[in-house]
Image (cartoon, coloured by chain):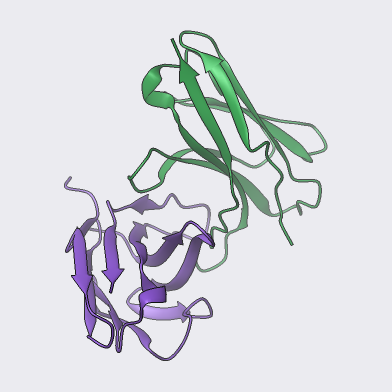
Chain colours: A purple, B green
Amino acid sequence: DAGVIQSPRHEVTEMGQEVTLRCKPISGHNSLFWYRQTMMRGLELLIYFNNNVPIDDSGMPEDRFSAKMPNASFSTLKIQPSEPRDSAVYFCASSFQTGGTDTQYFGPGTRLTVL
Amino acid sequence: DAKTTQPPSMDCAEGRAANLPCNHSTISGNEYVYWYRQIHSQGPQYIIHGLKNNETNEMASLIITEDRKSSTLILPHATLRDTAVYYCIVSDTGTASKLTFGTGTRLQVTL
């Protein structure tokens, strides 16, 4: 199994530009999570999907952030317009949630730098 | 409010057991204890989880006290590759597990 795949691994952009981060979860998993990690705030959950439906987006910082999951094998996190304070490492994770416990598997992350 | 309390850092000699403590005094009956670790520049990695019984897998052992207010993660023979930040998390599984990561314990394994 290839694990969770994220692209790009590194992104450098200028303030005001649109940024799209991509995630391919592990095949067969039904839950997908987007996290953001910074030195100041640590690792924060932004949003999670179950069966492609957004369940909780309370961690999304503001309207500039949006996430979609058009099918079970693909999700995007978009920032428009980007700002320097959005610089962080963004992780995607997936799991197979059956109503009991589940284990989240994390991707390698996308390091975003907004100049 | 933080659900777990962990020491900020610990050292361990290579080959020795690493015992990482975690306090979760407000844990409720349906909350599990999860442990993840994050090696520098990588995504977090699941280690183990438990409800009230002690658990063991190929990576580690999890000892949960009888009152469930604290737990200990044990790496039986620490290696340099175990140097990482270890997160203890309590989570109620509903539709999906919402993991709230605290600051964790930075374990440094030394020669």
A9 up-or-down from B49: above or below:
below
Residue at the (35%, 73%) spot, across then down: A51
Q: If the image is split into quadrants, where does the C terminus of chain A sit? A: bottom left
Residue at the (53%, 80%) spot, across then down: A58
- Depth check: A16 or B42 in front? A16
Residue at the (20%, 60%) spot, across then down: A10
**Residue B100 visible in the displayed image:** yes
A19 up-or-down from B11: above or below:
below
- In percent of width and height, residue A27 lies at 21, 57
**Residue A50 visible in the displayed image:** no
Q: Is residue A40 left or right of residue A51?
A: right
A27 up-or-down from A112: above or below:
above
- In percent of width and height, residue A39 lies at 48, 56
- In percent of width and height, residue A30 lies at 34, 65
Q: How many marks?
A: 0
Residue at the (56%, 54%) spot, across then down: B101
